[in-house]
Amino acid sequence: MVEAAVEIGEKELKKIGTYVKKHLPEWMGELRRERELDLVERIVRVEEEVKSLREVMETRFSAVYERFDAVDQRFESMQEHMETRFEAANERFKSIDQRFETMQQYMDKRFETVDKRFSQLQWMMGIGFTLMAALMGVLNFF
């Protein structure tokens, strides 16, 4: 170990002790004041940072709300557009249905006329076969 260069006696140690006791509260007060000022400065900086973060968050949230509003408006316009398209498609299907009904009525009339002609042709063929059979019978008889 290193030995002290100067030996301090009891009297000097008591003097040093009383000096330290006398000035210790003053020194501690200065240290405490410095620490308190440092803490107050830190608190102020933290409060300012929190305030700026709050402002940034508010601007970002308002931007997000505006985007949500824009998306809602877009969905509403798309919904309206789709409704008009579906209504147009329904109208087209109704016109197609009417056209099919008209075609069905026309086809029914055509089939009725074909049936009449066919039934007339059947009668004519029946009468013709009957006459031919009668003629053949008469001609065979003579």
Image: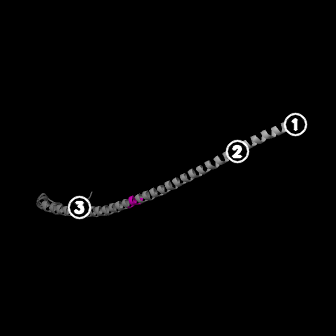
Residue matched to label 2: 120
Q: Residues within 10 Å of mark 1 (few under 14, many from 20)?
A: few
Q: Return the mark for residue 32.
A: none
SS for dot 3: helix
The residue to which callout 1 is attached is: 140
Residue 122: image location, x then y, percent: 72, 42
In the displayed structure image, the side of residue 86 where residue 48 appears, left or right: left
Q: Is tag 3's residue or tag 2's residue first in the polypeptide sequence? A: 3
Using residue 92 as the reference point, say whether residue 15 is left or right of it. left
Residue for badge 3: 43
What's the residue at 47%, 55% (across, down)? 87
Q: Amino acid under label 3?
A: Ile
What separation in Å lies between label 3 and label 2 (alpha carbons)? 113 Å
Q: Is residue 6 visible?
A: no
Q: Is residue 73 magenta?
A: yes
Left or right of 96, for residue 36: left
Q: Is residue 123 left or right of residue 97?
A: right
What residue do we see at 75% from left, 41% from top?
127
- The stretch in magenta equals 70-74
Q: Position of residue 36 (x, y in %)?
A: 19, 61
